[in-house]
Image (cartoon, helix red, strand yellow):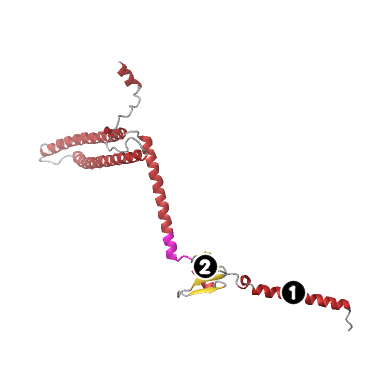
Amino acid sequence: MVRTKRDAGAEALATGMLAAAALTALTLLAHPGFARAATYKWVDEKGVVHYTDHVPPEAVNKGNAELNKQGVTVKKTDPAPTPEQRRAKEEEDARQRALVRQQEEAAKRDRALLSSYTTEGEIDLARNRSLRTIESAVQSSKAYTDQLTRRKAELEGKKKTEFASKPMPAAMERELDSINEELVKQQDLLALRQKEVVAVNAKYDADKRRWRELVAAKGGEAAALADVNALPAPPEPPAPAGKTAAKKK
């Protein structure tokens, strides 16, 4: 077969292209960035530190650090959390959420306290109103108790006299039993009212302490004084129309 000049030229061109490609490949392979695009540092279950050009499957969840060619960490992957760690994180997240809710509720109560009272005297007035409401219920319960006690004494007197030698009528027996049950209920109610008095006093004592703290934090006149009586008297609120008219007279 006779080779023409054209064939020889094509063959020379192909040979040149192959040589150029080979030279390029050798150059890239010899370049440090190509030979080792990244180095990964990871620790196995025995605590042995490894440096590899890839993270093996068994070490994916153990965490690793990607190093550049100068050995500087450019990316860090944390180990996958254990079930215990996940549970601990969930509990901590829940605790933090609860803490945030508590702080929000406390801030809301503080705003309500400052908007409800302008002086300590107003807090005392609110306390007295609450205590008067409880006292009214106590007096009503005591009056009812006295009424029941008198009726009980009346029935028991009849039982000892009119029905000393014969059975008391069933209706009277039932009434006496009902009175005894109601007296127990009233005693429990009075005990509950006493607890309410203690709770009301504790609430308004706490409100007063917190009000003082908030006013002091805002630089108010109660900043350095524990007793509102030592402060200049605040301006009195406008009196109702009826009282104003009475004063003018």
Quadrant in which residue 15 is drawn: bottom right
| Relative horizontal placement of residue 126, taking residue 163 as reference (left or right) | right
The mark that comes first in sequence, 1 or 2, is: 1
Residue 82 is one of the magenta-drawn residues: yes
Q: Quadrant of the C terminus?
A: top left
**In the depicted structure, whether residue 27 falls above or below residue 119:** below
Name the foreground residue: 144 vs 189: 189
Looking at the image, the residue that sits furthest to the top is 249
Q: Position of residue 49 (x, y in %)?
A: 48, 74
Residue 65 tag number: 2
Task: Give the alpha-carbon distance from disc 1 to disc 2, as whole Å.
Answer: 37 Å
Question: Which region is colored magenta?
Answer: 79-89
Is disc 1 placed on a helix, strand or loop?
helix
**In the depicted structure, whether residue 29 falls above or below residue 204:** below
**In the depicted structure, whether residue 98 falls above or below residue 16:** above
- Looking at the rendered image, the disc whose residue lies closer to the viewer, 1 or 2, is 1
Name the foreground residue: 160 vs 43: 43
Name the foreground residue: 129 vs 184: 129
Quadrant in which residue 193 is drawn: top left
Q: Position of residue 100 (x, y in %)?
A: 41, 49
Q: Position of residue 115 (x, y in %)?
A: 38, 35
Q: Residues within 10 Å of mark 2 (few under 14, many from 20)?
A: some
Residue 69 is one of the magenta-drawn residues: no
Q: Residues within 10 Å of mark 1 (few under 14, many from 20)?
A: few
| Amino acid type, callout 2 | Ala
Residue in the picture at 44% in, 62% down: 86
Q: Which residue is mark 1?
A: 20
Q: Position of residue 47 (x, y in %)?
A: 45, 74
| Amino acid type, callout 1 | Ala
Residue in the picture at 19% in, 34% down: 147
**In the depicted structure, whether residue 238 falls above or below residue 193:** above
Name the foreground residue: 133 vs 22: 22
